[in-house]
Image (cartoon, helix red, strand yellow):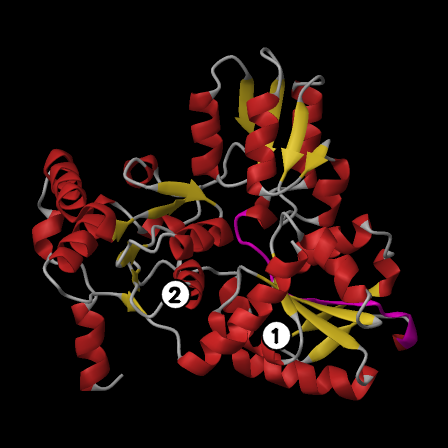
Amino acid sequence: MNILEALEVKSRMLPEKYRNMSVQELEDLIRGIKEKMGKKLFLPGHHYQKDEVLQFADATGDSLKLAQVAAENKEAEHIVFCGVHFMAETADILTTENQKVYLPDMRAGCSMADMANIYQTERAWEFLQVLFGDTIFPLTYVNSTAAIKSFVGANGGATVTSSNAEKMVRWAFSKKDRLLFLPDQHLGRNTAFTIGIGLDEMAVYNPVENILEYDGPLEKVKVILWKGHCSVHENFTVKNVEEVRQTYPDMKIIVHPECRREVVELSDMAGSTNYIIEAIKTASAGSSWAIGTEMNLVNRLIAQHPDKHIISLNPHMCPCLTMNRIDLQHLAWSLESVFSGQEINLIKVDEEIASNAKLALNRMLVQS
């Protein structure tokens, strides 16, 4: 790291001033700035955020919904995204030149998104073209970097969400014989299996070793899964399911499709974050649920639905650590910086990357 890089990193570090403020002082500061800036400021907050942060959100939802809402909010000049880096990138891609997007803490990344970088992806594409020719349609989960979205867009592909993955995978197969799904192998596997693709027709591409993990004949491969995963959802196990079944025989298990195939297979229901929220919301009073998703959301659902018995599928689960980088101190710092005209932790996607990434996003939005 050179001197300029070191100075840049230091400039992104939380000033001591905010560390020394009480919770009440931080909350008062945040409320005051929101009131002064009015509609010029917009705070989207992801479902997995801490309650201390989410209380100030102008809109809550999943990553794509929040980026779309931000883009629709033309009055907002400054968007402080309470989520992780790829989410803020998507918001910048979809908003106008006059709107600026900020991330309160640049350390708020996503381990899944980081499992596919552009060098690996370009190398994989070249490798897979040699094996399968021009028969592959690329899809990337929105939980990916702008560079990966751009690569997919430039190669005729599209993005997907956990809500529309099934529809998008079906659409992809109407275009090409094979599918490359990145960066989450579990969402790709669960979705493909749901539409009738056999597990023996799915191969896994290992980006570290640049090899295809598959034992059968290559001509049988229909889906190529990138070897990536969500560090939160992969921690739900078959043992967790078995323990719930034994302890609470009448309890329903609902999980996110980022969970492993065997966990989804043994659960009663599987779906996106919004799907889980709505399922609990509409469930009858007195019903019992074990939820396999991020802990902040599970705890919030427990608090919001005292008429239902709700537990985490994994009682030892921790919240998403990178999402939890955003706290009151960083939010207060970000808002005060914006209010004073400083562009601390501004998220700006390169124009060419943004253009191709928008192609991938728009192809999905047209289908949805």
Q: For label 2, count other residues whose C-alpha is less than 10 Å away and answer few (under 14), some (14-19) or many (20+).
A: many
Q: Which residue is mark 1?
A: 152
Please tell me which residue is depicted at 20% across the width and 78% down the height of the picture: 6
How packed is label 1: few (under 14 Cα within 10 Å), some, or many (20 or more)?
Answer: many
Q: Name the residue located 17 percent from the left edge and 77 percent from the top edge.
A: 7
Residue 117 appears anywhere in the view: no
Verify CB contact (< 8 Å) between mark 2 and mark 1: no
Q: Locate residue 334, reporting x and y percent.
A: 20, 56
Q: Is residue 87 above or below residue 358?
A: above
Start-end of magenta stretch: 219-232
- Residue 322 position (above or below residue 38): below
In the image, 68: left or right of 289? left
**In the image, is residue 220 part of the stretch drawn in magenta?**
yes
Front-lying residue, 304 or 232: 304
- Secondary element under disc 1, as helix, strand or loop, is helix
Q: Amino acid at mark 2?
A: Asp
User: Residue at (58%, 30%) from the top-left corner?
Assistant: 278
Q: Which mark is residue 6?
A: none
Q: Earlier in the sequence, mark 2 or mark 1?
A: 2
The residue tagged 2 is 92
Residue at 66% x, 46% y: name it.
257
| Badge nearest the viewer, 2 or 1 | 2
Residue 61 drawn at (x, y percent): 46, 43
